[in-house]
């Protein structure tokens, strides 16, 4: 599951990085990003059921450290402003990478 999350995070970053390079595929890229964030949201929601107390450290708009539950992160992945504000893809990637190192299967 963690490897799947890491793959989705990587693909979101790559498509987002190339978004400005390819004007002809902008609509396709935006649709892909929406679907990828939805898939990532579903994966995080599934994990939140298995690990209800799991939280990821983040920094809010005031610069304060906060903990975001997996359930909250799953909801936030459906709001582009929240994705950017909290750097969710990077947060999820770092969290999943740590988990994957502990449980490589």
Image (cartoon, helix red, strand yellow):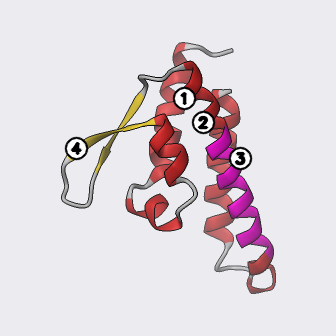
Image quarter of residue 40 = top right
Asked whether 24 falls inside the magenta stretch, the response is: no
Q: What number is the disc on residue 48?
A: 1
Please name the residue shown 64% across and 80% down the image. 20
Q: How far apart are the two marked residues, 2 and 3, measured between alpha carbons?
A: 10 Å
Image quarter of residue 46 = top right
Earlier residue among tags 2 and 3? 3
- List x then y, in percent, for residue 64: 18, 49
- Bin the neighbour count of mark 2 within 10 Å (Cα to Cα): few under 14, some 14-19, many 20 and up: some
In the structure shown, which secondary structural element does the residue marked by tag 2 occupy? helix
Q: What number is the disc on residue 39?
A: 3
Q: What number is the disc on residue 65?
A: 4
Q: What number is the disc on residue 45?
A: 2
In the structure shown, which secondary structural element does the residue marked by tag 4 occupy? strand
In the structure shown, which secondary structural element does the residue marked by tag 3 occupy? helix
- The quadrant of the image that shows the C terminus is top right
Establish if 33 lies above or below 2. below
Q: How far apart are the two marked residues, 2 and 4, measured between alpha carbons?
A: 22 Å
- List x then y, in percent, for residue 60: 27, 54
- List x then y, in percent, for residue 89: 52, 50
Earlier residue among tags 2 and 4? 2
């Amino acid at each position: 599951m963690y490897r799947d999350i890491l793959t989705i995070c990587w693909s979101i970053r790559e498509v987002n990085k190339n978004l400005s390079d390819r004007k002809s595929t902008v609509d396709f890229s935006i649709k892909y990003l929406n679907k990828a964030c939805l898939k990532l949201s579903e994966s995080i929601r599934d994990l939140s059921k298995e690990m209800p107390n799991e939280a990821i450290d983040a920094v809010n708009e005031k610069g304060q450290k906060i903990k975001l539950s997996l359930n909250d992160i799953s909801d936030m992945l459906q709001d582009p402003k929240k994705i950017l504000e909290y750097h969710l893809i990077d947060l999820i990637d770092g969290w999943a990478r740590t988990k994957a190192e502990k449980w490589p299967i």
